[in-house]
Image (cartoon, rainbow, N blue to C red):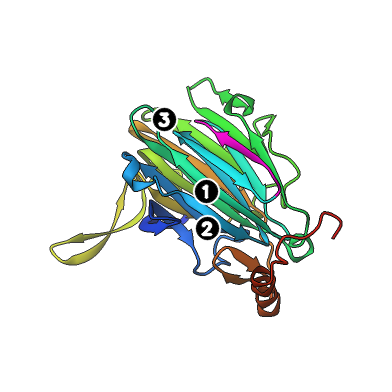
Amino acid sequence: MSLRPAISTSSARPTLEGAGVHLHRAFGFHKPKTHDPFLLFDDFRNETPDAYAGGFPWHPHRGIETITYVLSGSVEHSDSLGNSGTLGAGDIQWMTAGSGIMHQEMPSGNVNGQMHGFQLWANLPGSLKMTAPRYQDVQGKEIPQIIDDDGTQVKVITGEFWGQRGPVDGVAGDPLYLDITVPANRRKAFKVDTYRNTFAYIFEGAGKFADTSTPQGVLLEKEVRGEELNIRDMSGNRTLVQFGTGDEIVVQAGPEGIRFLLVAGTPIQEPVAWHGPIVMNTREELHQAFTDLRNNRFIKPKDH
């Protein structure tokens, strides 16, 4: 058994998307090979409707899959295939854009006006970029939740873990997507496939991801009196941790516990041509996609 070291850590950065939705982006649009097969990860977490009410009006996608996980509030969605529905707290939507889809996502808050969720973009290999689009909406009650003897909780959204398999199926690369809660001051190890790119995203509490037998915090940059210092510290809210090779991840939870997403996927290792919501392999394919969009040929017939 070899521990996977935490090779980098960073904080999600504030940004605006859609019609003025405030969110934090952990990665995306730069260095797409770093997290291959994943392209982008957004944390949309707001306390008041004015920060998200504009939503994400009609827009296209081609060549990718999007994974939306709602923690509080809801997201109403509709698409060019005639699908529509509402994702509530705990629900998941896995959308395969494939050859092309137009859709919109309109968030609403809970009774206190709060809205919280995540969206992850996963690349499709060249052989599947023009596959037929589809949706998978999964209610939270369908997601297996495992509670270990020490109180650790794991929700298996997709992939197989601790003898349970997530309800989302048939996606490219069969990624692993887990929602993990480790109780206060607990040290916990999780096995992850050595050959998969793996990251953790912390969104509650704090903890230390270890790369030795003695747990240490991941390396963080902090500024003290105008000078940046590299120190060992606990990683907390909105922290992205990228892991190196190995087959086990170890986390030491802080005094308030820690909750994080653990995501792993097999790299596609193909060229990436990316502009906005469309991701292809070549600039020619990208140009064709936007030509299709301008000429109303973006949505392909079912028998294409």
* Classed neighbour count for the residue bearing mark 2: other residues with Cα under 10 Å, few (<14), some (14–19), many (≥20): many
* Classed neighbour count for the residue bearing mark 1: other residues with Cα under 10 Å, few (<14), some (14–19), many (≥20): some
* Tag 3: amino acid: Arg
Asked whether the beta carbons under mark 3 and mark 1 sit within 8 Å of each other, the answer is no
Mark 1 and mark 2: Cα distance apart in space: 8 Å
Q: Secondary structure at mark 1?
A: strand
Q: Quadrant of the N terminus?
A: top right
Q: Which residues are magenta?
A: 81-89
Circle 2 is placed at which residue position? 40
Residue at figure coordinates x 33%, y 29% from the top left: 112
* Classed neighbour count for the residue bearing mark 3: other residues with Cα under 10 Å, few (<14), some (14–19), many (≥20): some
Query: Reading the chain from its start, which is encountered first: label 1 or label 2?
Result: 2
Mark 3 and mark 1: Cα distance apart in space: 28 Å
Asked if residue 304 lies left or right of residue 294, the reply is right
Report the front residue among 300 and 260: 300
Residue 186 percent coordinates (x, y): 41, 30
Circle 1 is placed at which residue position? 119
Circle 3 is placed at which residue position? 186
In the rendered view, would you say 58 is above or below 156? below
Asked if residue 64 lies left or right of residue 8, the reply is right
Query: Reading the chain from its start, which is encountered first: label 3 or label 1?
Result: 1
Residue at figure coordinates x 40%, y 30% from the top left: 110
Asked if residue 295 lies left or right of residue 261, the reply is right
* Tag 1: amino acid: Gln
